[in-house]
């Protein structure tokens, strides 16, 4: 099965601090897609990023950035100058492929609390 | 563009009763997913449809859960009979073609089984 490990279950930071959420994944496929989702207290999962395994360039979107290291199977997410609205549970989704319909096993995610 | 719609938003039932949830995906999306999310855990995929065919239902407890997606659009998920451990949020998501595409999630249905 495709799976991910988010070692940090809970993180607390003070507003305006930078914070990095770690994600390590497992897959036997060479072509796959990775995703991050955010789940605020309202409960709805919100898409943040989709990354193809062939594209190892880092991505920046406003205060959000992602560091993809295929050699270490990691896809880490950094929030710069965190804000209270960033408080949420963040999920790194298991790798998806076009040919593999293995069980999709989300982990418990990382719960981020940004303290004003 | 309208998002994924789900109803009801909340449901409280007693154990051994039946319940059904409805999902309307984003227009044109071929793949529809039902997830179960127990408090404090990540979403667990119950069933994945592509158009009106089942792609994966390996984690669906088939003795009590059933799902259908008639005409490849709307979907219903049914639990009959419900157990206490079925208390969870049931999330519906859709993606344009398959699971390599971005999934867009609905607001979920919070089920409480007493």
Image (cartoon, coloured by chain):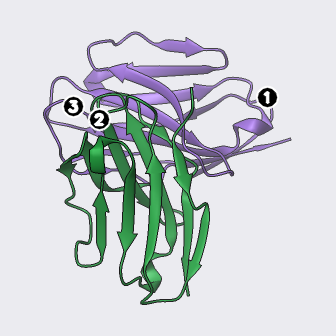
Chain colours: A purple, B green
Name the secondary structure under disc 1: loop
Q: Is residue A43 visible?
A: yes
Q: Nearer the viewer, residue B79 or B114?
A: B79
Residue B57 drawn above or below residue B87 = above
Disc 1: which residue: A16
Disc 2: which residue: B99
Q: Position of residue B29 (x, y in %)?
A: 37, 32
Crowd rating for badge 2 (residues with CA inside 10 Å; few <14, some 14–19, many 20+): many
Quadrant location of the C terminus of chain B in the rendered image: bottom right
Q: Are marks 1 and 3 on the same chain?
A: yes
Q: Residue furthest right?
A: A116
Q: Looking at the image, which residue is at 24% across and 26% down?
A: A32
Q: Is residue A109 left or right of residue A72?
A: right
Spatial separation of the CA atoms under disc 1 and disc 2: 35 Å
Disc 3: which residue: A97
Crowd rating for badge 3 (residues with CA inside 10 Å; few <14, some 14–19, many 20+): many
Mark 1 or mark 3: which is in front? 3
Q: Check contact, mark 2 vs mark 3: CB within 8 A.
A: yes
Residue B101 drawn above or below residue B34 = above
Residue A76 drawn above or below residue A8 = above
Q: Position of residue A68 (x, y in %)?
A: 39, 21
């Amino acid at each position: 099965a495709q799976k991910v490990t988010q070692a940090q279950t809970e993180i607390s930071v003070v507003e305006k601090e930078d914070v990095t959420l770690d994600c390590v994944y497992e897959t036997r496929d060479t072509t796959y897609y990775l995703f991050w989702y955010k789940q605020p207290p309202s409960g709805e999962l919100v898409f943040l990023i989709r990354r193809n395994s062939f594209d190892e360039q880092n991505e920046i979107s406003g205060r959000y950035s992602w560091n993809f290291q295929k050699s270490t199977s990691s896809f880490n997410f950094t929030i710069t100058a965190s804000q209270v609205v960033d408080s949420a549970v963040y999920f790194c989704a298991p790798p998806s492929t076009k040919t593999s319909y293995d069980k999709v096993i989300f982990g418990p995610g990382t719960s981020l609390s940004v303290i004003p | 563009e309208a998002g994924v719609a789900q109803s009801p938003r909340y449901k409280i039932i007693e154990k051994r009763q039946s319940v059904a949830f409805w999902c309307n995906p984003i227009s044109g999306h071929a793949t529809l997913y039902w997830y179960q999310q127990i408090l404090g855990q990540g979403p667990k995929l119950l069933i994945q449809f592509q158009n009106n065919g089942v792609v994966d239902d390996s984690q669906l407890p088939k003795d009590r859960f059933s799902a259908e997606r008639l005409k490849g659009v709307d979907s219903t998920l049914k639990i009959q009979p419900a157990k206490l451990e079925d208390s969870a949020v049931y999330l519906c998501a859709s993606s344009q073609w398959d699971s390599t595409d971005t999934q867009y999630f609905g607001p979920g249905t919070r089920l409480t089984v007493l």
